[in-house]
Amino acid sequence: MLKTAKLQKTDSDIKKAAHIIKKGGLVAFPTETVYGLGANGLDAVAAKRIYEAKGRPSDNPMILHIADISDIYDLAEDINDIEIKLAEMFWPGPLTIVFKRKPCVPDVTTGGLDTVGIRMPDNETARLLIRESGVPIAAPSANTSGKPSPTRPEHVLNDLDGRIDAIIYGGMCEVGVESTVVLAKKDEIVILRPGKITADDLKNATGVDVRVDSAIAIDRPAEQIAYKSTKQNAEDCDFKPMAPGMKYKHYAPDAQMLVFRGDESKVKEAIKSKRASLEAHGKKVGIIFFGNDNQEIAAHELFDKLREMDKNKVDFILAGAVSEDGIGYAVMNRLLKSAGYNIEDI
Ligand code: TXA
Ligand code: MG
């Protein structure tokens, strides 16, 4: 059991945190999306400690966080014009670009892939920490593997207190869902994980066609995703998303969960009547309802609400869908995963 140092976003505490990173330790820190669990991404031993602390499968690659665009040239090669354009347009910000990696990036960090995901976070504390550490910081979300990503420092401590060296407190994350992950070819951009930066944003910025990796599209036929409620991962079926992390059971609350999608007033009615029947059977019910058009608020609060449900030990969560435009697509991706794709269209 480690003593996890509780640090503030002051210059002297950021220096302490950077010292821990330089020595091969683990520091949780705020970003604009979710809290990250950071270590020196070029140090295989340090990076391996992240997987151990999170209980994360070792084939799931980690994102390297940088503080200046020019840092990509130390880490990636064969960089194309579209990748540069995306970095210039969207960094610092919630976009991870998957590049061909240079040999200096260890296998542990990339899960053995010959590519590396890189992003420059739009959070000053995060960038100061990276600069002060003098290395790219490998950081997955700072949660126990399988749990909702942390959007508050308390979430991180619930999962990892005593398993990491330090945390920097930085309040609640603004965006609330993780970065958009993309693979950018010269003539096509593929979204490997949806986030705040949408297909339209990417298309408008580059003029290049954008598609969503078909393995993660949220309108996949139900039979193709049926395995999800029963299996921990998809090794033994044909579900092979290009971002390995998307195949794992994720964001899972302890309770069973059902999402209703459709006209807002009908969804409210459906939740009300389902709640009554569950409560009549002695079940403790929790509700997650943002309204169809409150996608940004939904993104900001979804993971916090899911964790609240666990804390309140509810047996059943009834949720309302949000519209799939803008960040709503990313919200629905997370909501459906949380619910094991248990959705009712009404
Ligand atoms: O917003 C975020 O991206 C947060 C903050 C901390 O930056 N990080 C985060 O990391 O969500 P993580 O490890 O929880 O999720 C990274 C996702 C996974 O689905 C992983 O499989 C994918 O990105 N990924 C990372 N590197 C990749 C690569 N080289 N090729 C394909 N997918 C990659
Ligand atoms: Mg994660």
Image: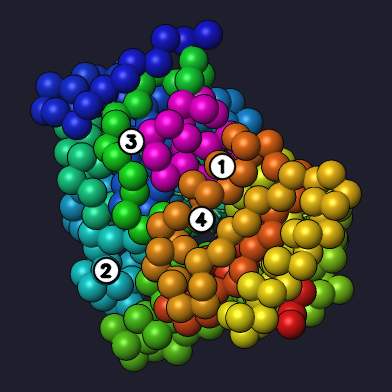
Mark 2 to mark 1 CA distance (whole Å): 30 Å
User: Are the two marked residues, 2 and 3, in contact with CB atoms closer than 8 angstroms?
Assistant: no
Q: Position of residue 154 (x, y in %)?
A: 43, 31
Mark 2 to mark 4 CA distance (whole Å): 24 Å
Q: In this picture, which residue range is highlighted in magenta?
A: 142-160
Residue 24 against residue 323 in the figure, above or below: above
Answer whether residue 154 is magenta in the image.
yes
Looking at the image, is mark 2 or mark 4 nearer the viewer?
A: 4
Q: Which mark is residue 90?
A: 2
Residue 129 showing in the rendered view: yes
Residue 55 against residue 296 in the figure, above or below: above
Q: Earlier in the sequence, mark 4 or mark 3?
A: 3
Circle 4: is it few (<14), some (14-19), or many (20+) Cα within 10 Å? many
Residue drawn 74% across and 44% down? 284
Q: Earlier in the sequence, mark 2 or mark 3?
A: 3
Q: Position of residue 206 (x, y in %)?
A: 31, 85
Q: Position of residue 328 (x, y in %)?
A: 49, 73
Q: Tell me which amino acid carries mark 2.
A: Phe
Mark 1 to mark 4 CA distance (whole Å): 9 Å
Looking at the image, is mark 2 or mark 3 nearer the viewer?
A: 3
Q: Which residue is mark 4?
A: 302
Q: Position of residue 273 (x, y in %)?
A: 77, 67
Q: Which residue is mark 1?
A: 307
Mark 4 to mark 3 CA distance (whole Å): 20 Å
Q: Note whether ligand 1 is within 8 Å of mark 2.
A: no
Circle 1: is it few (<14), some (14-19), or many (20+) Cα within 10 Å? many
